[in-house]
Amino acid sequence: MAIRIGANPIGWSNDDLPEIGGDTPLEVCLAQAKEAGFEGMELGNKFPREPEALKAALAPYGLACIGNWYSIELLRRSAREEFDGTSHHRALMKAMGTNVFIVAETSNTIHLDRSKPLSQRPRLGSGDWRGYGERLTELADRLIGDGLRLCYHHHMGTIVQSPEDIDALMAATGPSVNLLFDTGHATWGGADPVALARNFRARISHFHAKDVREPMLQRARQDDWSFLDAILGPGSELGVYTVPGDGMVDYVAVFKELRGYSGWVVVEAEQDPKKANPLAYAKKGVANLRRFFAAADFP
């Protein structure tokens, strides 16, 4: 698989806060995604979850199904219990022809709670990573046996947020655990996305391209905002995330470190669509990615 540019529908309709973009029909999202130049879509709360219905929704726009976030709770469950609970999702991904299986630990996340600032996010103690990594590796191994590739999504407000968390996760897991590399979450979490791309190139198997507005990032850190308050932005102001090329991430340097990567590059920039026109930003993101690819001689 060569490089394909895809999108997450969160720029049109927000999964974490469903009322944001809640009145946008799925058909509008898909039509605009196609117009912007995307080849595939990750799923969101408005997508059907049965194979034939999902294929029927995507087919008129010629869009592939890339994958979908799946919340795991390995802090509370065994790998076998977690795997058994994924049966419907596994069947859907396989029926849609994708092997991308995106996961994130959500048993104690705070990213959905606007009342909790990010300073209150959960952390694992140094002695807890080994056991967690063993369970995650077992889950990944089971998924491989079913033809699926586990891609762990480091995410603000969760146990894997900081560069130290990412390092600990990668050190505690086997090669079957792949990293979903997200430039936006990496930057906000305090990591250098260029260094992350360099250090974990061999284990990066999925890529979310979103940018960070530095002034809003500084305010979110200084005032200790919640995740949702930061991505929405105060009043009429735009939030912390935006499409690639519209913020502080050096994408040319990132792509130079990712040479040889094969797979999806997914524009995932959650914003309030009433403030940030989804089609206009989608087109900007695609155009910027293509420009960065050329400048970095990527892939």
Image (cartoon, rainbow, N blue to C red):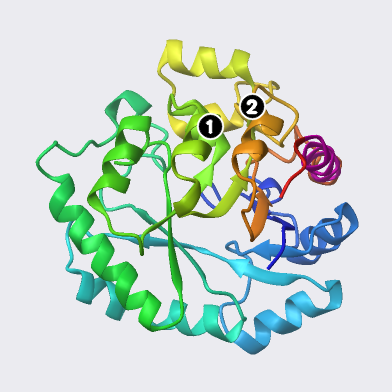
Question: Residue at 9% across / 41% down in the picture?
Answer: 127
Query: Magenta stretch?
Result: 282-295
- Residue 78 placement (x, y as % from top left): 17, 68
Q: Residue furthest right?
A: 35
For the N terminus, the quadrant is: bottom right
Q: Nearer the viewer, residue 297 or 254?
A: 297
Magenta highlight: main SS: helix
Given the image, on which type of amino acid does mark 1 rest? Answer: Pro
Q: Amino acid at mark 2?
A: Val
Q: Are marks 2 and 1 in contact (CB under 8 Å)?
A: yes
The crowding category of the residue bearing disc 1, from other C-alpha atoms within 10 Å (few below 14, some 14 to 19, many at least 20), is many
Placement of 257 over or under 190, stated as above or below = below
Of the numbered discs 2 and 1, the one sitting upstream in the chain is 1
Nearer to me, 108 or 164:
164
Disc 2 target residue: 249
Q: Is residue 250 left or right of residue 124?
A: right
Q: In which quadrant of the rendered view does residue 52 lie? A: bottom right
User: Measuring 63% from the left and 67% from the top, which residue is drawn there?
Assistant: 66
Q: Residue furthest bottom?
A: 52
Which residue in the protein does label 1 denote? 193
Q: Label 2 to label 1, Cα distance in Å?
A: 8 Å
Where is residue 90 drawn, in percent x and y? 45, 79
Q: Quadrant of residue 51?
A: bottom right
Residue 229 visible in the picture: no
Residue 25 part of the magenta segment: no
